[in-house]
Amino acid sequence: MADMYADQEAATTQLANEDVLVYEFFDMGVPSTNGDVAYGTSITYPGKVGDEYHMTKGHFHEVLDTAEIYYCLSGRGYMLMENPEGDWQAAEFTPGQAVYVPRRYAHRSINVSDTEPLVTFFAFPGHAGHDYGTIETKGFRKLCVERDGKPEFIDNPRWQA
């Protein structure tokens, strides 16, 4: 995860001091076949690397034309989404709020709380698969950082077209 953050110096320093658990997810092991629904929970813990909030790595689906739904169980944050054509959007997570991730959109959860984990339930078509490699290589176009005590989305200086 350290490579996912824009401030590599802060990430390296933090990792040298302590290997912080940023997020974890629990996939319920549903078959990855057409007609099944994969589902599970994701927990993104509070914290920042530099001024960038903790987040999940994020992914596209291997089958790009598949969507996903998230439901916020607790905490607060955002779902950052972008498609290959350059459109991006950020949907707010609050308890009881559902977020729809359209087909063709990469997505990552971001926890903007200083104290509370962001816990979400997710579901998507079982055959969709996950493409983490594109995000590992290119990153996301936008970052969510703290500015004047509030979340703000800025251009990612490390994003690669």
Image: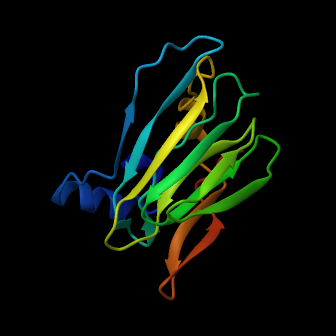
The answer to whether residue 105 is left or right of residue 150 is right
- Quadrant holding the C terminus: top right
Which percent across, then down, holds residue 44? 39, 54
From where the camera sits, is residue 134 visible? yes
The answer to whether residue 49 is left or right of residue 19 is right
Which residue reaches farthest bottom? 148
Which residue reaches farthest left? 17
Q: Name which residue lies at 52% across and 71% down.
A: 145
In the image, residue 152 above or below residue 37: below
Which percent across, then down, holds residue 5? 45, 56
In the image, residue 9 above or below residue 42: below
Q: Name which residue lies at 58% across and 59% down.
A: 97
Which percent across, then down, holds residue 45? 34, 58
From where the camera sits, is residue 156 visible? no
* Residue 142 found in image quarter: bottom right
Q: Name which residue lies at 71% across and 41% down.
A: 105
Which percent across, then down, holds residue 14? 26, 61
Q: Name which residue lies at 62% across and 42% down.
A: 69
Colour option used: rainbow
* Numbered label tally: 0
Q: Nearer the viewer, residue 41 or 48?
A: 41
Which residue reaches farthest front? 96
Q: Nearer the viewer, residue 51 or 159?
A: 51
The answer to whether residue 34 is left or right of residue 16 is right
Q: Nearer the viewer, residue 98 or 5?
A: 98
